[in-house]
């Protein structure tokens, strides 16, 4: 359902990320939301605990989204209640390279339609192997 609160919130999140509009992106999240992109330890999140709360999510934006050109290619979407899972890839262009992160990208919203969890299931090694110089 493309008019469901979770689908609309995910769409707003992606549009703001593509536009590199930090204020619009942060506005989609609940105050106590968590972003795990990718889930587990990474260069964005060495401890693998995720980025919880707007201040931490803003810092993630500055590290991961602001310096990147993003393209979202979702082939399938599954909705269950207030959650949505998207299967496909995100193409990331940054620092003279293009990387494709293939995986499952999920959103969960609260009753107000705010994202409370954005979780990205993609493998760092696989994405790194896809890197090509621009």
Image (spheres, rainbow, N blue to C red):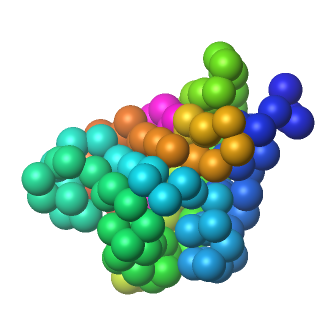
Residue 6 coordinates in the image, percent (x, y): 70, 37
Please indicate whether residue 85 sits to the left or right of residue 5 in the image: left
Foreground residue, 32 or 93?
A: 32
Q: How many marks are shown on the rendered structure?
A: 0
| Above or below, comparing residue 48 to residue 62 in the picture | above
Prevalent SS, magenta region: strand
Please indicate whether residue 127 sits to the left or right of residue 47 in the image: right
Residue 54 coordinates in the image, percent (x, y): 44, 67
Foreground residue, 105 or 96?
A: 105
Residue furthest left as drawn: 47
Foreground residue, 95 or 58?
A: 58
Residue 57 coordinates in the image, percent (x, y): 41, 66
Please indicate whether residue 97 sits to the left or right of residue 22 in the image: left
Q: Residue at x 20, y 48 (%)?
A: 49
Bounds of the magenta segment: 99-106
The answer to if 103 sits in the magenta stretch is yes
Q: Quadrant of residue 75?
A: top right
Q: Is residue 134 visible?
A: no
| Above or below, comparing residue 47 to residue 116 in the picture | below
Q: Is residue 77 visible?
A: yes
Q: Residue at x 57, y 68 (%)?
A: 26
Quadrant placement of the N terminus: top right
Q: Residue at x 61, y 39 (%)?
A: 109
Q: Residue at x 51, y 44 (%)?
A: 116
Residue furthest right as drawn: 3
The answer to if 124 sits in the magenta stretch is no
Residue furthest top as drawn: 80
């Amino acid at each position: 359902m493309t008019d469901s609160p979770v689908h609309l919130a995910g769409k707003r999140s992606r549009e703001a990320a593509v536009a590199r509009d930090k204020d619009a992106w942060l506005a989609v999240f609940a105050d106590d939301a968590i972003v795990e992109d990718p889930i587990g330890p990474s260069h964005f999140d060495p401890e693998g605990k995720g980025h919880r709360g707007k201040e931490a999510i803003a810092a993630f934006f500055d590290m991961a989204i602001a310096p990147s050109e993003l393209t979202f290619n979702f082939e399938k979407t599954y909705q269950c209640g207030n959650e949505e899972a998207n299967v496909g890839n995100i193409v990331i262009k940054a620092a003279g390279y293009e990387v494709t992160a293939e995986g499952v990208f999920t959103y969960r919203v609260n009753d107000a339609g705010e994202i409370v969890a954005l979780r990205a299931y993609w493998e760092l090694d696989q994405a790194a192997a896809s890197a090509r110089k621009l």
